[in-house]
Image: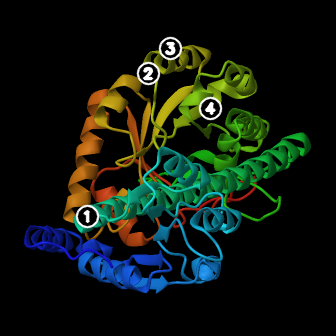
Amino acid sequence: MPRQPAAAERDGLAALAHDAAALVDAVALVVDDNADNVLLLRRLLERLGVGRVVGITDPRQAVAHYQMLDPDVILLDLHMPHLDGLAVLHALRRVMPTDSYTPVLVLTADASVAAKEQALRAGAKDFLTKPFQQTEVVLRVKNLLETRALHRLLQQHNAQLAAQLAATKERERRLTEQREEQRRRIEELLDKQDITMVFQPIVDLTSGAIVGAEALARFSGTPRRPPNEWFADAANVGLQNELELLAVRRAVGQVDDLPAGTYLSVNVTPDVAVDERLVSALAPAVGRCVLELTEHVRVEHYEQLVDAVGELRRQGARIAVDDAGSGYASLQHVLRIAPDMIKLDQQLIRDIDRDPARQALATALVSFGKQLGATITAEGIETLQQLDTLRRLQVPYGQGYHLGRPRPLPLLTLP
């Protein structure tokens, strides 16, 4: 008959049960041919807080119950008729997944070293001799359940890491494929020189005369996308300079078709501005060229850029800072470059006829440009109201759909 707990032991069991509320989801399987032992162990584990305890007295059913329950802990008697505990352990090991951890606590009256070694060698995780202290049983079970819970958490964590790794590899594979496709498209475009230049007039806002034209690239390749996406793809695969230089050469090749006395404005990033090939690309008409340095790209090495800009000026080119009032073109940037022209960003020009703050900023930039010796050009003029406001603010030059849309040469004479 199983031993009944003393009062002190019952108090200890109650304390353990109070601290083990997290065990409510645990499942325990008790295998013992003695029905009284099964009943006692069930009560102990339920008092501990184990959510479900299943007890069987026929060891031949142990494997079937394991497969049905997937228990978190198994309490197993070592000496039983029909099938002893060692045989049950061997049978369980054959059906347990290799990455699982289902601890088995062996309970036996055989306290010999040999019995312990046999049980542990067969796969048991812990060993208790009968008659057992009930508090000790509960402590051992609690420890085994905690270890089981940690193992499952580790498995879940590893599964999450594996899923994240697989997702990362898949994402990298897709990005690699995208880059390869981007490179293929850009290389094909460069090989075929499949680029067309259109030109938007730059106008004296007082007289209406065309003073220059900004060259803009257009692409007919597939998929059909805006020009900025083609240049972004080229930058992504390390071919940005090649594509920009192709656009510059195409634009310079048409400079003779511009109205006499006008200049050609071409857009370049700081990386292209310091590229030695830019000088030769501009050479056929460098004296008529204005280089617009886009400020949507951060300048990493100003000293190199300033040196390159100085050499281009010596060749006869003029320098413009593009999109002033947005991006990275701070006043410090303008001061370092000391441009010949400052182009006001179209976001600044939008609603300038209704927004006093925009008007104040434009006025400040006009004054700043005069102090610096740089002319001011407003981009994105789309309405007569914007044009009238800019004239009132004494902005001397401008471009935009209201003054002329980008188109192949020759430029249309403005009314």
345 or 286, nearer to the observer: 345
Which residue has dot 4 on it? 289
* Position of residue 251 measured from the top left corner of the image (x, y, whole percent): 73, 40
- Per the rendering, the mark at residue 307 is 3
- Left or right of 12 on screen, residue 41: right
Q: Element at badge 1? A: loop
- Left or right of 308 on screen, residue 388: left
- Left or right of 92 on screen, residue 296: left
The answer to whether the residues at label 4 and label 1 have Cβ atoms under 8 Å apart is no
Q: Mark 4, residues whose alpha carbon is within 10 Å: few (<14), some, or many (≥20)?
A: many
Q: Residue at x 69, y 33 (%)?
A: 241
Q: Earlier in the sequence, mark 1 or mark 2?
A: 1
What amino acid type should be assigned to the residue bearing mark 4?
Cys
Q: CA distance from mark 1 to mark 3?
A: 87 Å
What amino acid type should be assigned to the residue bearing mark 1?
Gln
What amino acid type should be assigned to the residue bearing mark 3?
Asp
